Image (spheres, rainbow, N blue to C red):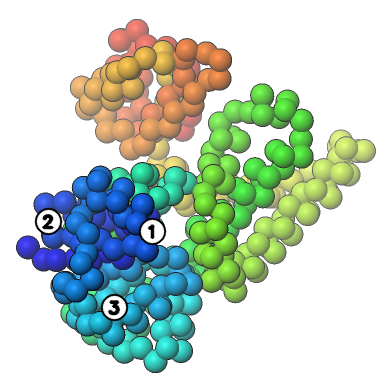
Amino acid sequence: MQSLLVVGTGLIGTSIGLALQGQRRVLLADVDDEALGAAVDRGAGQRWDGRTDVDLAVVAVPPLLTAGALQDLQRREVSASLTHVASCQSRVQHDLELLETDLSNVCGGHPLAGREVAGPAGATARLFVGRPWVACPSPETAADVLTQVTDLAVACGADPTVMSPEAHDRAVALSSHLPQVTASALAARLLESDTAAVRVSGPGLQDTTRVAASDPDLWTDVLSANAGHVAPLAALLADDLRRVADALSVLARTPDDGAALGVVRDVLSRGNAGRALVPVKRGVRDRDVAVVAVRVPDQPGRLADLLVRAAAAGVNVEDVRVEHLAGHQTGVVELLVRADQRTDLLSALRAGGLEVLGELS
């Protein structure tokens, strides 16, 4: 059985250990003894004694600390293969070069998976299943080290892909870092409003602000490390918002102003087109699926019952979204299925006496 050292027992590091249970011998290290103890208690691995060498060492600490941790492991000859999971690859690469680190046995990596819940308590063995895991070798990285990283991704259930550090950072600036800034800025507006906005909030606010619950300290490090890529995207988003704000100001005075209506529609239409590109899961996008909404009692087993009925009808559920209705003992479950299976699902649910609220293609 191969051995692995994970340095950093936060959400990602602990989830790696949990995902590899029974596949590899996992050792854990962390300067935070409480976090380390929690990860060990959850079964993510054993405490590292500081001396035992391993086949692969993974650094899972904040981006600004990653290069120093890698250099320390290299100096102590802990492993012939080193990787990390920093969300900003170019910054780590730059720091390693400044430290004059041997880059031949280092290959960056970044699993595109996470939760707004930080720390080992939020870790799960299935965090990486079906998610991209980007390996970011430098020109000096040895081929066998790259293979170790992609093998790790596969072992955790992820789909490995290879990109340069620069290409990776440019991509995640739009797909991950800008959404965090946007969600946080939107949620911050609630602090300056009366309580009515929260009382009448629906799934739109919940969906768009979910990641605003993420750790501010962690994200300050991430955004500062990738600031060069995120800043121009944030400026473009601000431009769109400013154009909409100006147009709405015109419409508040002149509701039928054609130019102002055109500005609003343009942003909404471009949003439709962009959203259609976002995958529900690998190989499946929103434009490929139909959404069937069902009202269900907030009782144990009711969600499972929906999925069992779908399976019995031969329908594969691509995704599930749940909206809890505040103050009610019911919720709305949206089942996302392939468009050509929508009719079969509707028939199965209605035959079971379930309350179907509607379907959207």
Badge 3: few (under 14), some or many (20 or more) residues near its Cα, within 10 Å? some
Amino acid residing under circle 2? Gln
Residue 281 placement (x, y as % from top left): 35, 47
Q: CA distance from mark 1 to mark 3?
A: 18 Å
Q: Residue furthest bottom?
A: 100
- Give the residue pinned by disc 1: 32
Q: CA distance from mark 1 to mark 2?
A: 26 Å
Q: Is residue 300 visible?
A: yes
First reached walking from the N terminus: tag 1 or tag 3: 1
- Give the residue pinned by disc 2: 23
> Along the horizontal axis of the image, is 361 left or right of 337?
right
Residue 285 placement (x, y as % from top left): 41, 46
Residue 143 placement (x, y as % from top left): 21, 82
Amino acid residing under circle 1? Asp
The residue that appears at 35% across and 49% down in the rendered structure is: 120
Amino acid residing under circle 3? Leu
